[in-house]
Amino acid sequence: MTDDKNTTGAQQMNGLRTEIDALDREILELLNRRAGCSLEVGRVKADAKDLIFKPFREKEVMANLLEMSPGPLPEDHLRAIYREIFSSSRRLQRPQQVAYLGPEGTFSYFAGVEFLGHSVDFQPMPGLPDVFQAVSSGETELGIIPLENSLHGTVGQSLDLFLRHEVFILSELFCKISHNVLSQAKRLADIKTVYSHPQPLAQCERWLRNNLPSAKLIPTESTAAAAVRVQDDPESAAIGHKSLAAMFGLNVLARGVEDLPDNWTRFVVIGRKQASQGNRDKTSMLFTLPDKPGSLVNVLSVIATQGINMKKLESRPMRGEKWKYVFFVDVECDLSLEEYSKAMTEVADNCHIMRILGSYPAGPSLDVSANVGDAE
């Protein structure tokens, strides 16, 4: 009886595997047909000198797929599959280089992989100014930069660099950040020194005080640099993304060591040209105002009168101009719609200088604390 059950089970398994093999052949054929269409799209874009990265179109395709999908494939699996399909399609149309704050293994790197896929040529840069310079000079087509953190606020340097470089925001993404203790050691008790970027050290201060009270804390230029530092020192540890463990041959001694677990960073993708089609959920701009009473109120009144929701308003000192400020604003409006376009013209009329940084789709929330590095 047992032998009969085993035989039946083996036959069922063979039948299912045969069906899966046939489905894989169909999927492969369809993927190659899709790739052929992508190549044709790339030729049309090249003739029109158009952007390869189309966040509006990718968001639209993904929304349609999620609506059509009957299951049982989970939503996050479908998103991951099509992230790589989009990434491959873009590379077939034209290989893209994307600058990011390096080295490989930083949270900027993992955010880029999670959003743009593995078919992108990521170029690490030593600092944020280098990312902006690479994009504005044409050295890379795109860049990915951190703009603000839910716990620590705006990355001021990123805002300042928009004043110095003629680049545009093409898309945004929100990434959940989680920190882990990585080391050659196998026990926390062996750790005498902890390396990391200053921000993760600050975000894990209470955990470090309670669990490694005697350890010396040493800041590094990035979490990836910290992982490099501890490779050959079994009495030291780094704090960073858990995928750094696989990249640098380290053990994960503790996971999720941040003091406040709901830690998100908003990244934006920047380019030299602004995307020109699709529904734009958000608009970012900067402006300076005449030095007279009511200047800021006049601008805010225009925005309020049009029923536009303001998501962010921040001022930054102007370099070389004492006691003068530039304002950065995020609003929920689509500049392709005439009423909003007219409103922005009226805003500009009340400003000394006004510049649209980008009008783009609202970004997804991604968990980069997951093992995005496992596929590399």
Image (cartoon, helix red, strand yellow):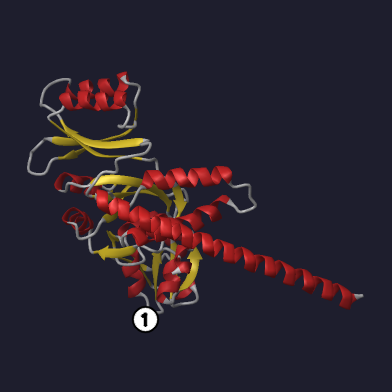
Residue under the point 46% across and 57% down: 34
Residue under the point 43% across and 45% down: 59
Whole-percent x and y of residue 109?
35, 61
Q: Secondary structure at mark 1?
A: loop
- Amino acid, disc 1: Asp
Quarter assignment of residue 241:
bottom left
Q: Which residue is mark 1?
A: 232
Circle 1 Cα neighbour tier, 10 Å, few/some/many (<14 / 14–19 / ≥20): few
Count of marks overlaid on the render? 1
Quarter assignment of residue 134:
bottom left
Q: Quadrant of the C terminus?
A: bottom left
Whole-percent x and y of residue 369?
46, 58
Q: Quadrant of the N terminus?
A: bottom right
**Looking at the image, is 2 positioned above or below residue 101?**
below
Q: Nearer the viewer, residue 191 or 7?
A: 7
Q: Is residue 26 visible?
A: yes
Q: Is residue 111 visible?
A: no
**Looking at the image, is 50 positioned above or below residue 231?**
above
Q: Is residue 62 left or right of residue 314?
A: right
Whole-percent x and y of residue 189?
47, 73
